[in-house]
Amino acid sequence: MSQHRRRPSTRRDARRRAVVVAAAFAGTVALAAGIGVWASSGGGSGTGAARQPSGSPRTASSAGRSGATTPTPAPTRSYPLSQAPRTIPAVRSHTAARGPGWRPRPGGRVVVSNAALIDEGRLTAGELGLTYAGQKAADDDVRPGDLRLDLGGGGDPESYTMTVRGGSVRISGPGDAGVFYGTRTLKQEVHGGGTAPEGVVRDQPAKPQRGFMLDIARKPFTADWIEARIRELGDLKYNQLGLHFSDDQGFRIESDTHPEIVSRDHLTKAQIKEIVALAAARHIQVVPEIDSPGHLGAVLAAHPELQLRNAQGVPTRGAIDISRSASARLVDDLLNEYADLFPGSYWNLGGDEYQALTVANPQTSYPQLAAAARQAYGASGTVADLTTGWLDARADTVRAHERTMRAWNDGFLRGTSAQPAEDLQVGYWTGKENGARQPVEYLRAGRKVLNYNDEYLYYVLGEPNTFVYPTGQRIYEQWSPRVLRGTTAVAARYEPQVLGGSFAVWCDLADSQTQDQVAAGIRMPLRATIQKLWDPGTPAMSWTDFRNLANRLG
């Protein structure tokens, strides 16, 4: 911004200069027409009043000795075209304009057009130091300094338009999620540079599912820590938080149906309700996971009679005996119980790493499973068939609660007569399992896939089994949602089937980091991941600039 000021004339010069100013006035006004359009295009001082072009004087009454008024020049401004906002993730489109932009100021208000935006309005008002003025139906009830939130229009419900013009801001979108994301953009603009630039932002995500998954089963995290991450995720426009709360090391949420399985260090249902409510206020769905038929060690510690044992009677770690009807009843009790606690649209069934399938001959090693498979699927039935049938039965339980379900890719087994339910989405995380299948096999079959690529998106505490802590730079410069396995992307024609992805924290060696160290370690990877989920193309900003921007935004 540049500013041009003229000193008022002295009394001694007033009479002499008045003639000159008056003579020049008409020519100056005519010249101003060639400088730019102001009040109608968003330029000017941001007061909402009619604006004079740069270079044209305003008249001010000043009494001379004779009492006559003398025209004197007043300060004026001219503005260059605005620059696009610098936010994380970057906005998809910005139409530049001339003007001072917008920043919160005393007396500024937040008004909403629809009661559905009350929460967004109150939150943003508190964050920006504005007054929440409630619901105002009329567009003309907007004052200079105001922020208006509107619902309307069509298209992606997560899209929004933000217009900065005439000293006020309007954020509109077809859904409340999109309007919320617009307020996140505005908040970053203000916190990063103090001013939202003049012009129009049109923005929407490339991918509908943008997640962060947290393993609280192996390592308990406090409710406060989780809530802090929710606030961070909301400001970054994530919309899912996965909670893996049952595994061999712990079962971390209070249970009414089976209190005997709950670990000493756990979250109460009241705490979970607060977490879910805070997430919902940030347009984040909490996606629960009770992994089965493997990874059930904490549950089986209280029910050793349901532990899978091989032909020699040796227990198999974390594996439940899926030949027993009591096993299904136990897990279904838990799925039904937690459906009310987690009212979102999505559910993770797990399904990975069932140890009965890792031996050379499951039918020989686990004769009870082989017998149950033949009974269910005929003489050629296998343990893999029985395992697939288990996953489908658990899907039936969750489907009754009207959830969209996913399972880990190694829970989809090859060569089985039983087939995984058609509506199961694939959480693709690895290619290291026995008989691993390339992502394209799932895509060719018409499956929808979420990207959990362990090459880039797995933050595994202690770095066991060749894992290394992922870096934001590597994600930012190399990964995209189509890079589902390793470092190679699937063909562009499969783009619509890749629904998004999730950065994941797994706590294999739980004491390797404190929860504060985890928060610091994932900070830049989370920002790089959301940039690529929001816009998978090559970023315009270098990694160094992106990192510096992240540090400035906080």
Image (cartoon, rainbow, N blue to C red):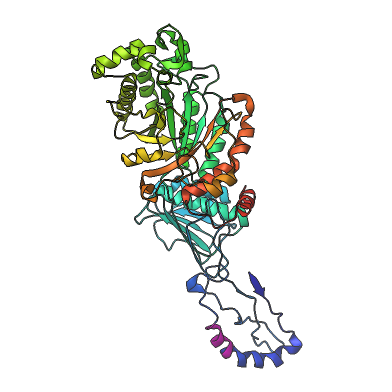
Q: Main secondary structure of the magenta part?
A: helix
Q: Position of residue 284 (x, y in %)?
A: 45, 40
Q: Position of residue 211 (x, y in %)?
A: 47, 39
Q: Nearer the viewer, residue 31 or 537?
A: 537
Residue situated furthest left in the rendering: 378
- Horizontally, residue 428 falls left or right of residue 543, namely left
- Horizontally, residue 146 falls left or right of residue 172, namely right
Q: Nearer the viewer, residue 178 or 67?
A: 178
Which quarter of the figure is the N terminus placed in? bottom right
Q: What's the magenta region? A: 27-34
- Horizontally, residue 196 falls left or right of residue 207, namely right
Q: Position of residue 232 (x, y in %)?
A: 55, 42
Residue situated furthest top in the rendering: 312
Q: Residue at x 34, y 10 (%)?
A: 368
Q: Position of residue 357 (x, y in %)?
A: 40, 20
Q: Nearer the viewer, residue 70 or 375?
A: 375
**Numbered label tally:** 0
